[in-house]
Image (cartoon, grey):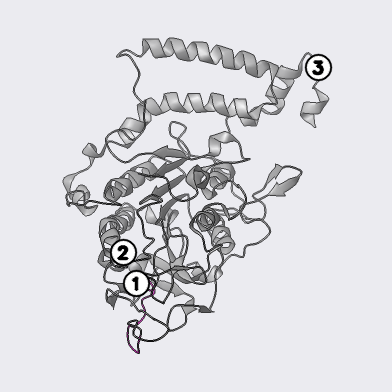
């Protein structure tokens, strides 16, 4: 309305600039709808569909579940033990995570939004398996802003893109400065970060020229929010030249912390950089980044074990110790209380064999878990049947998970909306129930 009223006025640029001044700094921390239990999220995403039966909801191999029956049933292949502190049964391929299950709120009754990889991946990230929608990280950036203007509010550390591609961290119709910034594990995590000359003088001249052109263009088009986002991205990129090298500098970490995350181990294959990813995630969380996502592998190879379930053991070896270390490190620094650590995959795997010794896609039940951020440690929510095919108690939909995470961050999922194409959109669409049983 304001833009329409002043649209024909010579004073338009100045009036709109004042009336819409809040848009000039869209990432400043914002007030919450209610008191928040958590300030930030670290989202660990395991690509490909992790078998719940072989990890966090182990089922017995007794009674013909070794595949000898007509139904080709197959139980947990790796063995399992209870966590000694809280008794939660976890597979032997996750021994380090099992040791911190007293901090973990485990959901065994999750239902996927789709049975195909790309759609289910988008459903877990955006709430919509079929239409392009903003990522959960973008919604949280939009709703809460960030604490550190020198780093992006939403960072994705991924060696390869997962199913769904860049849409998993896209802002879609939200302003562009809320989309995720992808970082590559290793010695050069952000390309072209260093100035082209030693003094930075050439870059200063270039930035000044670009800024003049952008401001002149913006003065004539004050309604162009995409242009405002572009200008903001230049500012953030310039500030990152100072902040990012320090944030990603693991040489500053003491040796015992590097060993905690397993950086001294010899690892290879998918997920080999996961120790680096987890330690950087803790450093970014310390420096005020609001939402950090860690993706262990890409769209191939990954946890999609159709032919041989033993693939799960190698993948778990690469990510188990770093994942547990992240929880331990956050706890000993006093950060776990106000940090949500979410571990998820797109769906589970069938209780029956597929191929020689694999499993197919299974959407009806699978496991995800959360730690910190006011979630109930040592708690198991939901029950599946004896073979891990269906949920028999307390099912949880993806929208319920999103609604509960937003609640812990101080946001009402029904009030976090954005007007687009004539209607209000939200992360949970027209669904979502807060699962209070998960909360401490």
- Circle 3 — which element? loop
**Residue at label 2?**
312
**Residue at label 3?**
9
Q: Is residue 407 left or right of residue 15?
A: left
Marks 3/1 in contact by CB < 8 Å: the verdict is: no
Residue 27 visible somewhere in the drawing: no
Residue 351, placed above or below residue 192: below
Residue 336: quadrant of the picture: bottom left
Residue at the image position 39 percent from the left and 64 percent from the top: 50
Along the viewing direction, whichever of 385 and 356 lies nearer the viewer: 356
Q: Is residue 186 left or right of residue 419?
A: left
Q: Earlier in the sequence, mark 2 or mark 3?
A: 3
Image quarter where the N terminus lies is top right
Q: Real-space Cα distance between discs 2 and 1?
A: 8 Å
Residue 8, placed above or below residue 130: above
Residue 201: percent from left, percent from top: 37, 10
Along the viewing direction, whichever of 414 and 389 lies nearer the viewer: 389
Marks 2/1 in contact by CB < 8 Å: the verdict is: yes
- Circle 1 — which element? loop
Residue 160, placed above or below residue 369: above
Residue at the image position 31 percent from the left and 67 percent from the top: 308
Does residue 393 belong to the magenta stretch?
no
Residue 341: quadrant of the picture: bottom left
In the image, the segment drawn in magenta is 53-64
Residue 180: percent from left, percent from top: 48, 40
**Dot 3, how many residues are within 10 Å of its Cα: few (below 14), some (14-19), or many (20+)?**
few
Q: Can you tell which mark lies on residue 89?
A: none
**Dot 2, how many residues are within 10 Å of its Cα: few (below 14), some (14-19), or many (20+)?**
some
Q: Nearer the viewer, mark 2 or mark 3?
A: 2
Does residue 55 belong to the magenta stretch?
yes
**Residue at label 1?**
54
């Amino acid at each position: 309305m304001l833009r329409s009223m002043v649209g024909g006025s010579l004073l338009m640029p100045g009036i709109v600039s004042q009336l819409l001044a809040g848009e000039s700094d869209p990432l400043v921390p914002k007030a919450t709808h209610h008191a928040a239990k958590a300030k930030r999220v670290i989202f660990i995403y395991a690509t490909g569909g992790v078998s719940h039966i072989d990890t966090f909801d182990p089922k017995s191999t007794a009674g013909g579940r070794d595949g000898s029956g007509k139904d080709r049933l197959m139980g947990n292949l790796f063995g399992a033990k209870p966590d000694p502190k809280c008794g939660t049964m976890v597979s032997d391929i996750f021994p380090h995570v099992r040791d911190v299950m007293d901090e973990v709120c485990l959901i065994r009754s999750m239902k996927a939004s789709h049975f195909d990889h790309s759609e289910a991946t988008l459903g877990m990230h955006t709430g919509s398996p079929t239409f392009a929608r903003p990522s959960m990280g973008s919604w949280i950036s939009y709703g809460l802003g960030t604490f550190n203007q020198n780093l992006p509010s939403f960072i994705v550390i991924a060696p390869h893109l997962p199913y769904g591609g860049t849409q998993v961290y896209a802002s879609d119709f939200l302003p562009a400065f809320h989309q995720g910034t992808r970082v590559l594990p290793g010695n050069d995590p952000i390309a072209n970060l260093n100035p082209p000359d030693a003094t930075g003088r050439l870059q200063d001249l270039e930035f000044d020229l670009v800024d003049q052109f952008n401001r002149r263009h913006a003065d004539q088009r004050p309604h162009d929010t995409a242009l405002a986002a572009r200008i903001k991205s230049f500012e953030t990129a310039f500030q990152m030249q100072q902040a990012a090298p320090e944030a990603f500098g693991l040489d500053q970490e003491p040796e015992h912390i590097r060993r905690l995350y397993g950086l001294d181990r010899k690892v290879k294959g998918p997920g080999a950089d996961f120790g680096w990813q987890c330690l950087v995630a803790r450093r970014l969380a310390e420096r005020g980044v609001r939402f950090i996502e860690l993706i262990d592998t890409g769209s191939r190879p990954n946890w999609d074990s159709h032919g041989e379930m033993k693939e799960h053991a190698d993948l778990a070896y690469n990510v188990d110790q770093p994942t547990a270390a992240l929880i331990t490190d956050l706890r000993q620094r006093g950060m776990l209380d106000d940090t949500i650590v979410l571990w998820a995959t797109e769906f589970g795997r069938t209780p029956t064999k597929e191929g020689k010794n694999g499993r197919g896609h299974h959407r009806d039940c699978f496991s995800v878990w959360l730690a910190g951020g006011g979630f109930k440690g040592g708690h198991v929510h939901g029950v599946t049947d004896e073979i891990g095919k269906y949920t028999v108690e307390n099912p949880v939909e993806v929208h319920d998970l999103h609604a509960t995470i937003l609640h812990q961050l101080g946001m009402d999922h029904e009030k976090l909306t954005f007007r687009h194409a004539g209607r209000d959109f939200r992360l949970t669409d027209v669904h979502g129930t807060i699962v209070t049983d998960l909360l401490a």
